[in-house]
């Protein structure tokens, strides 16, 4: 019988052997099978209790939102179906291709099985979900993965090929079909995942018990909602092993703390550099590790660096609007930087939504003659939302209503878990199902990963601010049309005449380069727009020492062409990070070199060490 105590909590799952599933099953002893049976019995009992919790949570969700589709995907799927069946000949042709694909898969499977029996090595499978050798060894599992992939690809192409759909309808339908296809992958179920099955036999069922424990812990942490663990949260602590570049908090307002970083050069540029990160995340994406910290790198280049660390708002700030974040965020931060020394002008950086706020503030400042910002840089930031990224599927009427109701239910703020779940849903295979497999099917703990720790450390958002942002920018696109009203002024991007550096990333699905380009052309001054490799985060945070990815630069600075393709075709490719190009651009717009400023010697005394207190909230 099992050697484990009935109520013992499994802490560690033993390392498994490198043998195929059939060999593992064939070499199970009677004692092994008895222990496996006992552990599976325990897992079944625990699963029943978890099922009750999940069912209750689902029922409460449905009751709260008066249905299972609060974001309103059903009408879009209905429209897709209606237009699909309006041309039955095309649907019949699609069905023919589906079955022809199955026949081809069967024939390929027979050929591959002959190769296996002859000891030939099969080529590496392209989809990373199915690259483990266990999928290769058994013809049944190989056939299963190929059939699944063909079916899911067929389903996606079916939606893509429906004619007469507007952009939002196609996006919504694609999102649902891709989510469904990802969810029904055979890798996501114990009995159809040979890697998980082998782990179950190798550990005598301990992996299943540990998986149930992991699921239970995540439900408890989410208070009934599944808070999926993506990394070992205990492995990181802000200020101890991430976000550790030396500096001081020199100002604390209601919306932010201002961090001034300690210089590491004898002289620094006269004009300081002020960062406005997105308020949806914590600022330390700019200062993760010492070997990839943008802040540390900029300090080493002689810049006097300041960073806004936004507060994690509670219901007390529910009525704070974009105007408040401009006045008590952007303007208050500039005022504070000026008080640290005899400073007249600053250079500013806006990242993502922080860049949208910065551009809004610049347009307002142009209206009132405020010229304190000398030059501006934007990372992955949109000002025109016609071709906005994947988040646009959550801005139609139904989704907008859902988000407003969620904020009201939380007392006037959007729960950070909702935004985390939203971003995860945009990349389900990487950010949801890979962890379901690892944590629950394999019974393993997620590995420490600083970027995923930061990704899970999101903030709440005030109702007035978030509602305004979704409606005026995403839904109505007023800013790019010159119709956005802020504090009695109608803003126009064309009024912004200072030099602008615009960073975009080739694979960014949150702020696509095509969308960024549309906004870049609306500025009134000189704009240098570059294209980086990778996506929304890695495309920005790419230290030159890493020698990763590539970037594309304009051959010479000139007015951006009307067509984004013409701009892209004019770029020249370079290996590695774009940071050096930005440094070259920024340095000539940062004034002369002066003696490095000592922290706390101006009008603002030091409050505490960086990274401050707001980032921990």
Image (cartoon, grey):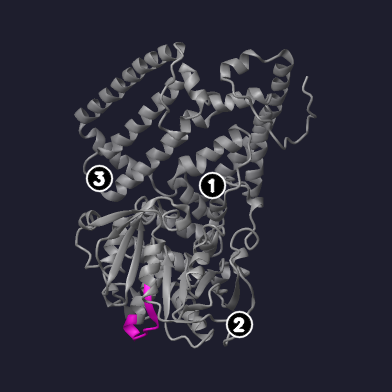
Seen in the image, is 252 located left or right of residue 401? right
Q: CA distance from mark 3 to mark 2?
A: 59 Å
Residue closest to the eye, 522 or 299: 299
Give me the disc on residue 229: none
Seen in the image, is 45 located left or right of residue 604? right
- Label 1 crowd (10 A; few <14 / some 14-19 / many >=20): some
- In terms of sequence position, does the residue under pointer 3 or pointer 2 come before the other? 3
Image position of 344 with respect to 50: above or below? below
Give me the residue at 39% from left, 48% from top.
72
- Label 3 crowd (10 A; few <14 / some 14-19 / many >=20): some
Question: Mark 2 — residue?
Answer: 600
Q: Are marks 1 and 3 in contact (CB under 8 Å)?
A: no
Give me the residue at 32% from left, 77% from top.
498
- In terms of sequence position, does the residue under pointer 1 or pointer 3 come before the other? 1
Q: Secondary structure at mark 2?
A: loop
Q: CA distance from mark 1 to mark 3?
A: 31 Å
Seen in the image, is 380 located left or right of residue 335? left
Question: Mark 3 — residue?
Answer: 165
Q: Quadrant of the C terminus?
A: bottom right
Q: Quadrant of the N terminus?
A: top right
Residue closest to the eye, 232 or 375: 375
Give me the residue at 58% from left, 84% from top.
604
Residue closest to the eye, 201 or 488: 201
Q: Secondary structure at mark 3?
A: loop
Question: Mark 1 — residue?
Answer: 61
- In x, y percent, where is residue 377? 38, 69
- In x, y percent, where is residue 182? 44, 36
Start-end of magenta stretch: 366-376
- In x, y percent, where is residue 369? 34, 86
Q: Quadrant of residue 357?
A: bottom left
């Amino acid at each position: 019988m099992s050697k484990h105590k009935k109520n013992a909590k499994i802490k560690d799952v033993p390392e498994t052997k490198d043998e195929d599933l059939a060999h593992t099953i064939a070499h199970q002893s009677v004692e092994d099978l008895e222990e496996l049976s006992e552990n599976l019995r325990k897992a079944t009992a625990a699963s029943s209790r978890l099922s009750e919790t999940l069912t209750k949570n689902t029922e409460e969700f449905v009751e709260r939102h008066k249905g299972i589709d609060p974001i309103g995907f059903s009408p879009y799927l209905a429209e897709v179906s209606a237009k699909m069946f309006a041309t039955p000949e095309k649907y019949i042709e699609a069905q023919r291709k589906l079955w022809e694909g199955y026949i081809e898969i069967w024939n390929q499977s027979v050929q591959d099985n002959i190769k296996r029996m002859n000891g030939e090595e099969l080529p590496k499978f392209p989809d990373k979900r199915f690259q483990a050798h266990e999928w290769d060894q058994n013809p049944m599992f190989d056939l299963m993965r190929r059939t699944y992939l063909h079916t899911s690809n067929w389903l996606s192409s079916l939606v893509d090929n429906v004619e007469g759909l507007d952009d939002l309808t196609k996006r919504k339908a694609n999102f649902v079909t891709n989510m469904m296809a990802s969810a029904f992958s055979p890798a996501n179920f114990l009995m159809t995942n040979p890697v998980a099955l082998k782990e179950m036999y190798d550990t005598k069922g301990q992996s299943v018990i540990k998986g149930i424990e992991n699921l239970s812990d995540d439900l408890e942490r989410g208070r009934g909602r599944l808070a999926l663990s993506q990394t070992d949260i205990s492995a990181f602590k802000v200020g101890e092993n991430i976000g550790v570049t030396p500096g001081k908090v020199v100002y604390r307002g209601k919306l932010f703390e201002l961090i001034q970083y300690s210089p590491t050069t004898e002289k620094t540029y006269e004009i300081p550099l002020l960062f406005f990160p997105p308020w949806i995340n914590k600022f330390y994406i700019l200062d993760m590790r010492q070997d990839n910290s943008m802040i540390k790198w900029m300090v080493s280049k002689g810049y006097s660096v300041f960073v806004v660390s936004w507060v994690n708002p509670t219901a007390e700030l529910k009525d704070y609007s974009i105007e408040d974040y401009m006045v008590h965020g952007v303007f208050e931060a500039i005022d504070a930087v000026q008080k640290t020394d005899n400073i007249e002008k600053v250079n500013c950086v806006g990242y993502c939504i922080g860049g949208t706020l910065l551009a809004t503030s610049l347009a307002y400042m142009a209206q009132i003659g405020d010229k304190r910002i000398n030059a501006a840089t934007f990372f992955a930031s949109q000002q025109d939302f016609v071709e906005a990224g994947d988040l646009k599927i959550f801005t139609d009427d139904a989704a907008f209503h859902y988000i407003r109701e969620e904020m009201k239910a939380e007392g006037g703020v959007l729960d950070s878990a909702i935004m985390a779940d939203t971003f995860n849903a945009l990349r389900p295979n990487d950010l949801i199902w890979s962890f379901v497999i690892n944590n629950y099917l394999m019974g393993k703990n997620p590995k420490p990963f600083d970027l995923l720790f930061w990704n899970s450390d999101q903030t709440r958002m005030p109702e007035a601010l978030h509602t305004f942002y979704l409606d005026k920018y995403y839904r109505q696109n007023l800013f790019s049309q010159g119709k956005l009203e802020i504090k009695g002024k109608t803003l126009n991007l064309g009024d912004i005449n200072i030099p602008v550096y615009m960073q975009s990333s080739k694979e960014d699905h949150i702020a696509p380069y095509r969308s960024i380009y549309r906004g870049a052309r609306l500025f009134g001054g000189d704009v240098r727009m570059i294209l980086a490799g990778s996506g929304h985060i890695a495309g920005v945070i790419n230290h030159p020492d890493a020698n990763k990815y590539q970037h594309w630069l304009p051959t010479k600075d000139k007015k951006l062409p009307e067509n984004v393709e013409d701009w892209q075709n004019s770029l020249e490719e370079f290996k590695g990070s774009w940071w050096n190009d930005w440094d070259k651009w920024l340095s000539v717009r940062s004034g002369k070199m002066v003696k490095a400023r000592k922290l706390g010697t101006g009008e603002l005394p030091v409050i505490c060490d960086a990274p401050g207190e707001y980032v921990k909230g």
